[in-house]
Amino acid sequence: MSLDSIFSKLKQLPTMPILLHQLMHDFADENAKIEDISKKIVMDQSISARVLKMANSVVYSRGVPVTSIEQAILRLGFKQVSSLVVATALNNSFKTPKSFDKNKFWIDTFQVSSIAKVLAKDCEKIDPETAFTCALLHDIGELVIQQCFPDEAELINLAMKAGQSRIDAQRETLGYDYSQVGAELVRRWKLPEFFVESTSQHLDPLSYEKVNPGAVIIRLSLFVNFAMTAGVPPAVIIKRFPTNLIGELELDEDNLADRIVELKGQSNELANILLS
């Protein structure tokens, strides 16, 4: 089965809205004006509601309620709003079967994304919000598989319950795994090649001639999330970090344990805002 045949099963390709493309361009423009971005955000009720809710959340609240998108952008910052806009658009783009726990999917994705963001704060090769967006996109292929192939997804789930890895089960059933499917979707959305590469390469980022730092951040974040979910203390996790990945990113490990705990605590609130 080719990637083209996989995507041909979609009655309609999940769309990256024109508004989102415009906003992503604006967020990357150093000369963009808050009032212009605000006017675009208020055009989408779902996005604007979540931006206001985040700005007034416990994590970001400073005691004074935010009542406008302009105030929300000032409180949150361009890049934080950009991440929320991307996440909202992604969440609204897919229709998955009832058997698939979409809430858990996004909670897990936000946990990984939040960890990626804090890791990138100690890295000069990728900025935190770009790392956050890379991680938001890393598992998007799973949603394509769930939407296009619900029956095959059930077979993959059964194989996993029998002890097979998700990667092997997907490749055996479909011919491709979620990272390859997700990268193709990101490519068809015409997002920057950096995000295509980070999505496709994160399973084994150092095996490529040109290493994509977004892919490395995703790999490390998945490692951290798995360990924290298993109850391993942050300080122990950091001591056991894969040294080759740390070396590639030239990470500063000082005080990283406390920051991971702090930011991971925010991830569930961000997921609740997205899913409400």
Image: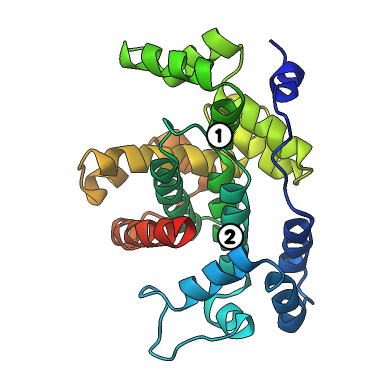
Per the image, the residue denoted by label 1 is 143
Question: In the image, is residue 163 above or below residue 188?
Answer: above
Element type at marker 2? Answer: helix
160 left or right of 13 in image = left
What residue is drawn where x is 39% and y is 11%? Answer: 159
Query: Is residue 41 depicted above or below 101 in this figure?
Result: below
Camera sees residue 218: yes
State the quadrant of the N terminus: top right
Residue 37 point in image, percent of width and height = 73, 75
| Residue at 45% from the left image edge and 88% from the top image edge | 65
| 148 or 90, nearer to the observer | 148
* Residue nearer the viewer, 23 or 204: 23
Name the amino acid type tagged 1.
Answer: Leu
Residue 16: which numbered mark, if any? Answer: none
The residue carrying mark 2 is: 83
Instruction: Residue at 73%, 35% (x, y): give it.
Output: 13
Q: Would you say residue 241 is visible in this rendering?
A: no
Look at the numbered disc 1 and give the secondary structure of its residue. helix
Mark 2: few/some/many CA within 10 Å (<14, 14-19, 20+):
many
Height in image: 143 above or below 4?
A: below
Q: Residue at x 72, y 29 (%)?
A: 11
Residue depth check, mark 2 versus mark 1: number of the one nearer the observer: 1
Quarter of the picture containing the C terminus is bottom left
Q: Quadrant of residue 58?
A: bottom left
Displayed quadrant of residue 108:
top left
